[in-house]
Image: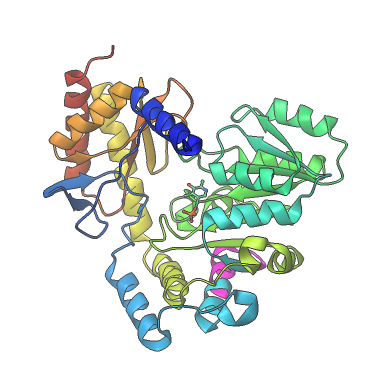
Amino acid sequence: MAHEGLAAIRRGLEGLDRDGLRRTRRVLDSPQGPVVVEGGLALANFASNDYLGLANHPRIRAAAIAAIEAWGFGAGASPIVVGHARPHEEAEVAFARFAGMPRALLFPSGYAANLGILAALADRSAEVFADRLNHACLNDGALLSRAAFRRYPHGDLDRLEALLAASRSAIRIIATDTVFSMDGDIAPVAELLALAERHDAWLVLDDAHGIGVLGEGRGTLARFGLRSPRIVYMATLGKALGGYGAFVAGEPELVEWLMQRARTYVFSTALPHAAAAVATAALRLLEEDPGIVEALAGRIAEFRRACEASGIATGSSTAIQPVIVGDSHRAVEVSARLRALGQLVPAIRPPTVPEGTARLRISLSAAHSREQVAALVAALVRALGDVPAR
Ligand SMILES: *Cc1c(COP(=O)(O)O)cnc(C)c1O
């Protein structure tokens, strides 16, 4: 019997090759850092989300090692059974204080957190309003909840307000990235909160790329001085904080509800103790050494100045700096040319970004030196010149 399912997959993979959309993985032979080793080459690393250089920071390593010595590795159970131990409890308390929120809950990952939040807050009768450029896991959470799913054009507050005004649902949820992951631009969070107030909605904020970066490291809410019982605040640990996992913070009853009802919390093993200990250590490090966040701000400013001087268009004030190339094939070729020049810069293609907006996605880090940023911009100028637009 012919295996039709496998044949369909083969055709699918051929299609990816034809469209220049097949992804391959790199195998790193070094820890994360401003320079990584891959394929026998040392490459300047502008590809990771390790915005503060904490992934391999001595204090983070020490916290992980100490936790493993004290607790072993596996948490052994769901947090609501016996997987929730002192390091997890301490991390939640530390994050609530750090973010200025009433209570926090430690989820297995950002992806799991967003699925859990939306499916626990929404049901079939609900409506979820989502920015079109949101991260995939907010979309997946909305779909999992079975709520009506209304996407509004990126940043279009008028369109969102019209959708909210037309809503007949008792449960309304606005969901947005705070810092958009492929463009690095910041959502109009204060205006979104005003809309949530006016239309009696929740505001789910995904601060994956804002925590550790904006508001002296305390995230996008701190950056704009916002507080509200309508806010469901999600911050991941895998990016600037150099670890793994995610926090969700908000009103005590909201967090209690998620603990009872978020399926990705209840039915998943608790994070390893070391991941919880690393979260606490990262928060403490940011409190004690604001210089780390300031160093990142310095690299962002230097990158922007150098790009402007070189005629490269950039538009972001965060660690994520897109250089739009347009065509997927050209984006891949420019990325390959950069690699030959010693620079690791990923090409991001559809479906991760909209059709016709393939780009280089440059991630800056506090761990980069000024010289590394200057060398990157020089290499960008060369690579873009070497691979002309078709
Ligand atoms: C990375 C990311 C996530 C997922 O977080 P993980 O902890 O890696 O699962 C969620 N939202 C946004 C915007 C992200 O960039």
Q: Residue at x 34, y 28 (%)?
A: 17
Q: Is residue 360 left or right of residue 76?
A: left
Q: Is residue 166 above or below residue 385?
A: below
- Residue placed most toward the observer, 39 or 97: 39
Q: Position of residue 188 (x, y in %)?
A: 60, 37
Q: Residue at x 39, y 32 (%)?
A: 13
Q: Residue at x 44, y 75 (%)?
A: 277
Q: Main secondary structure of the magenta part?
A: helix
Q: Position of residue 44 (x, y in %)?
A: 19, 45
Q: Position of residue 181 (x, y in %)?
A: 47, 41
Report which quarter residue 251 is drawn in: bottom right
Q: Residue at x 59, y 57 (%)?
A: 113
Picture quarter with the C terminus: top left
Residue 180 can be seen in this image:
yes
Q: Is residue 200 above or below residue 63?
A: above
Q: Is residue 117 above or below residue 385?
A: below
**For residue 255: magenta?**
no
Which residues make up the magenta segment?
Answer: 93-103
Name, please, the residue furthest toward the front: 1
- Residue placed most toward the observer, 39 or 63: 39
Name, please, the residue furthest toward the left: 40
Report which quarter residue 16 is drawn in: top left
Label total for image: 0
